[in-house]
Amino acid sequence: MFKRLLLSVATFVFALIAAGQETKKIMLVIHGGAGTINRSNMTADREKEYRAALEQALHIGQAVLVKGGTSLDAVEASVRFMEDSPLFNAGKGAVFTHEGKNELDAAIMDGKTKKAGSVAGVTIIKNPITAARAVMEKSQHVMMASRGAELFATKMGLEIVDPSYFWTERRWKALQDELVKEQQGKPQAELERAPENRFGTVGAVAVDQYGNLAAATSTGGTTNKQYGRIGDSPVIGAGTYADNESCAVSATGTGEYFIRWTVAHEIAALMKYKGLTVQQAADQVINKTLKAVPGADGGVIALDAKGNFAMPFNTEGMYRGWMGADGVAHVSIYGD
Ligand code: ASP
């Protein structure tokens, strides 16, 4: 009798543990931008570099999750790594504005509390994603821009660099090419929209062992942007969003459309109010809604609190990858 009771208590405890483990599936998904990425405009060496960088970004974020760290810490760590790499259009590899400057945007959001922080148009903050997190955690505000954001970051003790830190030959050359095309009479809007001018934005979404989601995005925006143009990345609900009840999203693409179609929130809303899966919701917005709009090109990474995710894009390629608890890196670039 006592033995049987003991057995059923043990079964109950095991069932509880198993149920608990089911909701504790960690997952990290990242992107490094979408655009005209195909084998014809990629050298083998460059492809190797991108794959290695994406893998490292995955390992860095996943290590945080495996150690019991939060999804916020994981997405920040992965994005910081990509910001420090000259390969991506974020931080060190940011594209140039029309005036030959680097103006960076970034955002982060916590799916548990729905707290969010973002910075826009900053020029001296080495890691804009960390500044966005400081806005979220250490201020009353959600979004800070330009000089104000820089003053705040300085006050918070974040790493400040000379604007020349962001200069890279490759991005400078891209701006010069655009300026030449501009002189030849191509309309500004068309130049900014050209997908080859802006791939490389970075983002990460993660779920931690506590079942909490987070999203982070960082970018230099679009080559040759003018007049303090801000894209979708730092706009909560457009390029970045996280809500434990639906999903975490980080977007990349022509920001103007992602703002107008509130892409990240639209995906979350389709899940929350229409009961779509994360794959269905992300596909709907990227491959149906936006695909029907000329110029609305790009992609997203989207992840729910159970670890299900989607990585749709309507461009030729998107740097992307994911890693679960087993630590195996899955990285893809093209449309296969
Ligand atoms: N979405 C970014 C922006 O418009 C650019 C990109 O993702 O490539 O600023």
Image: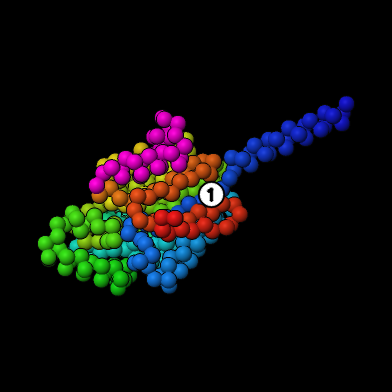
Q: Quadrant of residue 276?
A: top left
Mark 1 residue element = strand
Task: Tell me the residue at 28%/51% (across/down).
Answer: 254
Q: Which residue is mark 1?
A: 27
- Count every numbered label the image shows and give the total: 1
Q: Nearer the viewer, residue 141 or 94?
A: 94
The residue segment tinted magenta is 267-294
Q: Is residue 44 left or right of residue 21?
A: left
Task: Tell me the residue at 22%/57% (across/down).
Answer: 192
Can residue 274 be found in the magenta stretch?
yes
* Magenta span main SS: helix
- Pinpoint residue 43: horizontal percent, then vertical percent: 39, 71
Q: In the image, is residue 62 above or below residue 274?
A: below
Ligand 1 sits in which quadrant? bottom left
- Pinpoint residue 19: horizontal percent, then vertical percent: 64, 37
Q: Amino acid at mark 1?
A: Met
Task: Tell me the residue at 47%/37% (across/down).
Answer: 277
Question: Please, which residue is most extreme toward the top here?
Answer: 1
The colour scheme applied to this rendered structure is: rainbow
Circle 1 Cα neighbour tier, 10 Å, few/some/many (<14 / 14–19 / ≥20): many
Q: Nearer the viewer, residue 327 or 133?
A: 327
